[in-house]
Image: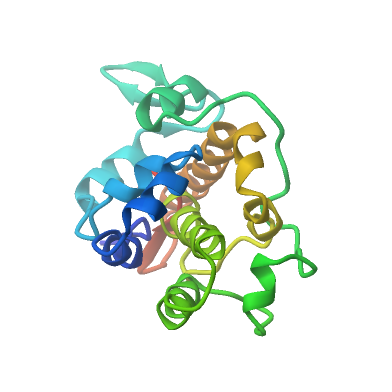
Amino acid sequence: MQVFRHYCRPKFLGSLNKTLSAEEKFIIESTPFGWLIVLDGKLKLSRCLLRELCSRWVERSHGFVVSSRVVPFSLLDVCLGIGLRVVGDKFDLEKIENNCKSRSFFKSSHVTVKMIYDEIVKRRNECSIDDFCRLYILLGMSEFLFPSRMGLVPGGLFRVVDDLGELGRFNWGGLVYDFLVQSLCSASMCMRRKTNATYIHVRGLCT
């Protein structure tokens, strides 16, 4: 039997949330991601439930089969579920952005969520509160909203988090929705093909 794996585990974020100061919370809560501060690192999802969701996914309808009918999964569900706006600018999550403040903290060509966490812990007492909050939100988005198998940070996020005051102008709900739908389609297709793969990997927030 194929084993389903998901990567939406805010372990590092949950650890940081225990140590946030009142000022740090205030700045983070002024962005669209203020709810990140309440996440617990013990958050889990049943693999059996994940398998059931993927087996019921209908790609062309973007919905789940329930009692012989397709229940749509829409942008509104993302909006209601986590409070992210579904209007505004979109950007390429995978676009490589090297010439920006948040990217300058890392010398490696690829950045992982663990590298962000380690950088935050190392610089906690010396970096500015704005830099801390930039890295914190970058970690939250990469570990919870756009998680990946290798824990890699989407390249397009670095420039976006440079300006905390501008985070509200982006269509975050649409980006999260597209990311998850793409993953559900991929996992569902893998199930239908009945491949010999031992694991089926599912990315995205709702996983």
Position of 198 with respect to 43 (left or right) is right
> Of residues 177 and 47, which is closer to you in this image?
177
* Residue 43 shows up from this direction: yes
Q: Position of residue 2 (x, y in %)?
A: 30, 61
Residue 167: image quadrant is top right
57 or 87, nearer to the observer: 87
Q: Of all residues shown, which one is farthest toward the right? A: 99
- What x and y, as percent, mark residue 151? 47, 69
Front residue of 122/24: it is 24
- Going 43% across and 73% down the picture, which residue do you hit? 117
For the N terminus, give its image quadrant. Answer: bottom left
Q: Position of residue 147 (x, y in %)?
A: 46, 58
What residue is rendered at 53% in x and 27% in y? 85
Say whether residue 119 is left or right of residue 18: right
Q: Is residue 164 above or below residue 151?
A: above
Does residue 206 show up? no
Q: In the displayed structure, does residue 173 sit left or right of residue 25?
A: right
Count every numbered label the image shows and give the total.
0
Residue 197, relative to residue 95: is it above or below? below
Q: In which quadrant of the rendered view does residue 81 lie?
A: top left
